[in-house]
Amino acid sequence: MTIWTKGLALGAMLACTAIPAIAQEKISAVVIDGYPARALWVKEFTNFFIPEVDKRLAETGNYVMDWQESYGGSIVKPKGVLEGVQLGLGDIGIVTTIFHSSKLPSQGIAAVTPFVSTDARAVAKAVDEIAREFPAMQNEFAKQNQVYLATGVVLDTYQVFSTKEVASVSDLEGFKIAGAGMNLRYLEGINGAAGVRGGLTDFYNMLQTGLVDAAQLWPEAAATFKISEVAPYMLRADLGAVNSKTITVNADYWKKLPAEVQEVLQAVAVDYRDHLSGLAMDRASAAADAYVAAGGTIVEVSDEDRATWANAMPNIALEWAKTLNDAGEPGSDMLAAYLSKLEAAGHTGVRDWTQE
């Protein structure tokens, strides 16, 4: 046998006895939200969250995700995400928490403290820190067969968009005003105003048909859903940024995930939180400009008007804290800690919600 043929034989032998490469495990993940793909938080789940998870998993090469995105009502309606993830219709969901105040009461912490901060970044960070420092928020999701990942804030601040010309808060007296969740309670500070429950995807038709005279939403959403066409007046009341989106994972699905995938999902969820709130702030000014360019008129609310409105409201923050206290949760401590975090970040409200 020649040296050349001996070399071929040795190579063949080594090829046969080489240690096989470890196969990359594929993990399926069904992501659900009832809102359409054009909604900011959904779009950024596609454009930021998913690519970021893929990139980090690629660093080790042990796992690859097989993403299946189902939005816009294909599996659940906007209010159905919590139940959809609970039942396993989706593995990962973007839960709009304002629809579930009875099941997720602690998630209302920003909603019950209006007129404090219009900074989505500060609110998102503070709420998420409260969720990690106090068990209540995560326990509420656990009862719904879900694992909490992170809280998202997609609105820089609620404003009031009206079909009728307004010059001040007093002009809203007697109006029917659309809202979702706790922000309907804000109207109790306005004489004769009546809240009408609805969702973001409903507001255009509600305003167009005259079912309501105004709606509470934020400029970016107003631009995305072309609200200026039906509500050409925006009362800039700066009601405040509110957490309304939480990324959760079906608990049964979560238990089956490898630890590496769990860690990546948790880490990216926090980055998504900050990315989303940063985008909300970046787009806030441009969205207001777009509203005006589309024919809308912005009416500024004075500091005195804001203070009068806030002080005319019932103290929904103390009501919220008492409800949690009565259920054995530290609601008062959570409220104080949350407001302290905002104050440390430079945000003090026109009313102290910890006091009667």
Image (cartoon, helix red, strand yellow):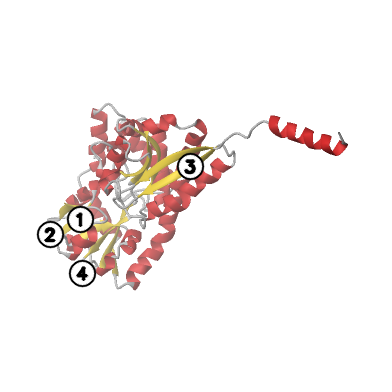
Amino acid type, mark 2: Gly
Q: CA distance from mark 3 to mark 2?
A: 52 Å
Tags 4 and 3 in contact by the CB under 8 Å rule? Answer: no
Q: Label 3 crowding class (10 Å Cα cut-off): few <14, some 14-19, many 20+? A: some
Q: Is residue 156 above or below residue 131?
A: below
**Lateral position of residue 92 relative to residue 311, left or right:** right
Q: CA distance from mark 2 to mark 1?
A: 13 Å
Q: Give the mark nearest the N terminus, 3 or 2.
A: 3
Q: Quadrant of residue 1?
A: top right
Q: CA distance from mark 4 to mark 3?
A: 51 Å
* Viewer-closest of 344 and 269: 269
Tags 2 and 1 in contact by the CB under 8 Å rule? Answer: no
Q: Which residue is mark 4?
A: 165
Q: Which residue is mark 2?
A: 174
* Viewer-closest of 283 and 257: 257
**Could you tell me which secondary element the residue under label 4 belongs to?**
loop
**Lateral position of residue 147 relative to residue 60, left or right:** left
Find residue 267 and report its horizontal and vertical position in percent: 49, 40
Find residue 309 and report its horizontal and vertical position in percent: 23, 54
Q: CA distance from mark 2 to mark 4?
A: 14 Å
Tags 3 and 2 in contact by the CB under 8 Å rule? Answer: no
Residue sitting farthest toward the top: 328
Amino acid type, mark 1: Ala
Find residue 11 and report its horizontal and vertical position in percent: 76, 35
Amino acid type, mark 4: Glu
**Could you tell me which secondary element the residue under label 3 belongs to?**
strand
Q: Quadrant of residue 300?
A: bottom left
Q: Give the mark nearest the N terminus, 1 or 4.
A: 4
> Can you tell which of label 3 and label 1 is closer to the viewer?
3
**Could you tell me which secondary element the residue under label 2 belongs to?**
loop
Q: Which residue is mark 1?
A: 178
Q: CA distance from mark 3 to mark 1?
A: 40 Å
